[in-house]
Image: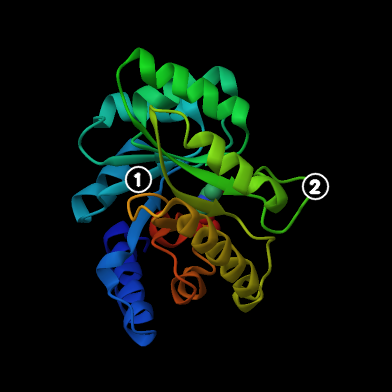
Amino acid sequence: MLSVKNNFNAVMRQINDAALSCGRNPEEITLIAVSKKKEIPVILEGINTGAAHLGENYIQEAVRKIDSIGKNRVCWHFIGHLQTKKAKSAVKYFEYIHTVDTIKLAREIQKQALKINKVQKILLQVNIGGEETKSGADIMDIHELAHKVMQLDNLSLKGLMCIPPYCADPELARPYFRKLAQIRDKIKEEFKNPAIMEHLSMGMSNDFKIAIEEGATMIRVGTSIFGRRE
Ligand SMILES: *Cc1c(COP(=O)(O)O)cnc(C)c1O
């Protein structure tokens, strides 16, 4: 029988083991429980088991759920593709937005954050596999985007996020994770401020162990916690 509690605890153990086996402190790794397409009772089960970070992909669905569960009860992360016209809601509801990939979107988030006097934490999404069909900024453009975002006072640049090309064998995702870490390190060096770009949001149910070995500080896990989606 599916039990969110057992699943969540099993994932926490796997994070712990993966971190220790590569000499990292498990506390550096934030587990984001991805609750897209899951309903409120199931999400509450996760929260009651200890999920403190929740990830959602679709603004309308998220707004409905967050209004019911509570904006400040857990830390909400937006991890889906964000349209400019939905930036206002994203800023209102989410502590982190992981999917900023154009300067246009960054400027709209800046505008909306300024209006409510908020400093919005964001990550830049990188199209790490250079896939036609995927969102994310090109690797070639990411430095320039990071520097432009740094000029926007109501944005706090927390790191980089990626979704590597899907592979059944998680080991094949390793080079993509490693590449994201290298890009992050290089940009971080340019800014010389430890609070900027500290995060690497990478790794999902299938491959979070490999992502942790490559330096992930935020992993986004849905299926392994809440079960398969419709
Ligand atoms: C759905 C989703 C996840 C979670 O994927 P699982 O394979 O269910 O763990 C993580 N990140 C993003 C961006 C997603 O859209």
Q: Which mark is residue 132?
A: 2
Where is residue 136 shown, x and y percent of the image? 65, 44
Q: Does residue 135 appear to the left or right of 193 in the view shown?
A: right
207 to the left or right of 46: right
Q: Position of residue 162 (x, y in %)?
A: 57, 54
Whether residue 188 is situated above or below residue 75 in the rendered picture? below
The residue at the point 44 percent across, 26 percent down is 90
**How far is the residue under mark 1 from the one under mark 2?**
28 Å
Query: Residue 77 at x, y = what percent?
Result: 39, 41
In this orientation, does residue 121 appear? Answer: yes
Q: Toward which corner of the image does residue 95 lie, by quadrant?
A: top left
Q: Amino acid at mark 2?
A: Glu
Q: Quadrant of residue 78?
A: top left
Type of amino acid at the residue the image marks with label 1: Leu
Q: Secondary structure at mark 1?
A: strand
- Work out whether 175 lies above or below 107: below
**Mark 1 or mark 2, earlier in chain:** 1
Quadrant in which the C terminus appears: top right
Residue closer to the observer: 143 or 131? 143
Front residue of this view, candidates 193 and 106: 193
Residue labelled with disc 1: 54
Camera-side mark, 1 or 2? 2
Res. 203 in view: no
**Is 98 situated left or right of 50 in this image?**
right
Query: Is the residue marked 1 within 8 Å of ligand 1, measured from its CB?
Result: no
Q: Residue at x 54, y 41 (%)?
A: 147
Residue 173 is tagged as none
Instruction: Determine crowd level at label 2: few under 14, some 14-19, many 20+ residues with C-alpha closer than 10 A.
Output: few
Which residue is at the front of the view, 88 or 63? 88
Check the image and name the residue furthest to the right. 132
Give the quarter of the figure containing the N terminus: bottom left
